[in-house]
Image (cartoon, rainbow, N blue to C red):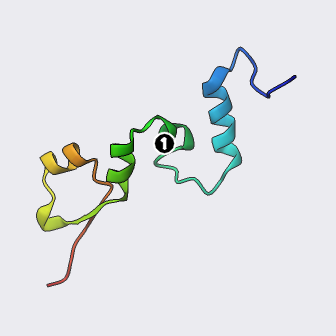
Amino acid sequence: MDNGIRSSEGVDGFFSNLTNAVPEIDEAVSFAEMLKMTAEEKIGQMIQIDKIAATIEIMKDYYIGNIFKSVY
């Protein structure tokens, strides 16, 4: 049975083809890269923090995905 994965391409080739077939995937993070992320990294990418709270340490430690500037 042909599963669509050639041995010369392997899994990386399969994910590359899959990523190219789904145009809605954000260009910054491909589908293949998201599959490699840990749960902590995925959760961190969904977190938005205020610019006032953003430090390099927080960004690295919590994998923050978005910073916004609130209007006070």
Relative height, residue 40 to residue 6 (above, below)? below
Horizontal and vertical percent position of residue 34: 48, 42
Q: Position of residue 52 (x, y in %)?
A: 12, 67
**Which quadrant holds residue 49?**
bottom left
Q: Quadrant location of the N terminus?
A: top right
Q: Amino acid at mark 1?
A: Met
- 59 versus 13 height, above or below: below
Tag 1, which secondary structure?
Answer: helix
Write down the quadrant of residue 72 in the picture.
bottom left
Q: Residue at 46% across / 34% down in the picture?
A: 36
- Establish if 25 lies above or below 19: below
Q: Residue at coordinates 21% horizontally, 43% vertically from top-left? A: 60
Q: Position of residue 67 (x, y in %)?
A: 26, 63
Left or right of 64: which side holds 23? right
Task: Farthest residue to the bottom: give it.
Answer: 72
Q: Position of residue 30 (x, y in %)?
A: 53, 44
On the rendered structure, is 11 left or right of 50? right
Q: Which residue ends up furthest to the right in the rendered image?
A: 1
Residue located beneath label 1 in the image: 34
Extreme residue toward the top, this view: 8
Side of 45 relative to 67 (left or right): right
Q: Residue at x 16, y 58 (%)?
A: 54
Name the residue rendered at 37%, 58% in the picture: 46
